[in-house]
Image: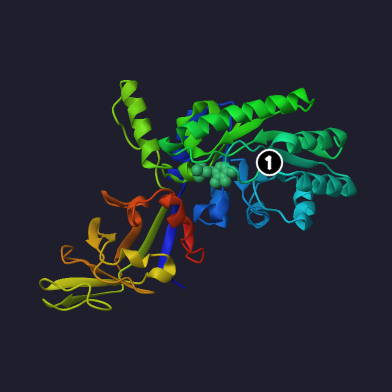
Amino acid sequence: MHYSSYIELSQKALEKNIRFLRKRIGKSSLFSSVVKGNAYGHNIGDFVPLAVRCGIRHFSVFSVEEAFAAHEHLSHDCHLMIMGYIDPEDLEWAISKGISFYVFDCGRLEAAVSRARSMGMKARIHLELETGLNRTGLEGQELERAAEIIIRNRDWVTVEAACTHFAGAESIANFWRINNQIKRFSEAVSRLERQGLSIPKKHTACSAAALRYPETIMDMVRFGIAQYGYWPSMETRIQYLLERQEDGKGPGQNPLRAVLTWKSRIMSVREVKTGEYVGYGTIYQTSRTQRIATVPIGYSHGFARSLSNLGYVLVHGRRCPVAGTVSMNATTIDVSHVHDARAGDEVVVVGRQGKNEITIGSFSDMSRNLNYEVLVRIPSEIPRVIVD
Ligand SMILES: *Cc1c(COP(=O)(O)O)cnc(C)c1O
């Protein structure tokens, strides 16, 4: 069967991103590949084996179901970490597979200890410390109590690390908040150590923190967005360019390259006379005789309806505007300037074709964290193909 659109994942692009990011964090910090949100829309079942081929051995997910999806694609020397949701009933599965998980309250800690004890195994935990995000995390007396529980149950729990998550390291607007979190993190770790708990490793950084606050790199970085080839925000990209300038270097090439390209094909091309409307309603009227092509993707595939009359796609390496409304399964584009465009020709919805590129950022209105949201909304049913 042939699909109306498909997604290519580029191994070369991923290798390039990993090389750049590894160089930034240095040899003593571990690269954890964050594959929550269906690997940011790349598809966990396709992305994880690709990342393993590129040398990644540590993966982070949010929930137990994502852990389940990732687990079957890991090689035996890989490690998996759950940063968020696990139902108490599933702790046993996680412990039995040696999967580590965040502990952010004493309830979960006690549940983990009791499961581990009844299994005769050790739970591998990461102590999540509350430092200012105010979502999940241990602090104050609860943190002290957690340390006591761990010390009393050393046979059933291994503390692998202490960790925290920043509240928006990609924006300079949060500069003071992030610095405060960094300080609170190190104070909380010292308090734990004074209580007699040894903290073998520390990790705090996501992509933006690793790129902007080098002191947050520590023993491991949890790389999400950047490994897929996107800057967490325009600011992070500008700061990188300024750094290069300070080092006396030119802007150079973008060191990050999008792993994902979303492609479709022209379904049909027709000539539409001057003054006719195209598609539903009256929002697009031809101003001369135009060649209009129909592409079999629409808002049911995550090609947002808000791209009506606004979006662009690439045909033969040339930008072609969306002409009229995006409908559920089809979108009309103007190919008047691409004279030899015909049915069956490749259409790039997101990604590079020839010298042109449709970036995820330009794919819809620019707004903060849009990269993330657009990516995870790409339907998982669209087939992914690994390319070199
Ligand atoms: C999503 C997430 C990350 C990765 O964030 P990016 O900005 O995509 O690099 C890291 N840590 C935690 C706890 C996360 O939830």
Determine the residue positioned at 64% across, 36% down.
Answer: 163
Instruction: Provide the secondary structure element on which disc 1 rests.
Output: loop
Residue 209 in percent (x, y) is at 50, 34
Residue 81 in percent (x, y) is at 66, 44
The number of numbered discs placed on residues in the rendered structure image is 1
Determine the residue positioned at 33% across, 31% down.
Answer: 241
Q: Is residue 274 left or right of residue 359?
A: left
Q: Is residue 80 left or right of residue 155?
A: left
Ligand 1 is within 8 Å of the C-beta of the residue at disc 1 = no
Residue carrying label 1: 77
Task: Please rate how many residues cluster around mark 1, counting C-alpha atoms within 10 Å: few if below 14, some from 14 to 19, many from 20.
Answer: few
Viewer-proximal residue, 12 or 83?
83
Q: Is residue 12 above or below residue 328?
A: above
Q: For residue 257, which quarter of the picture?
A: top left
- For ligand 1, the image quadrant comes to top right
Q: Which residue type does callout 1 highlight?
A: Asp
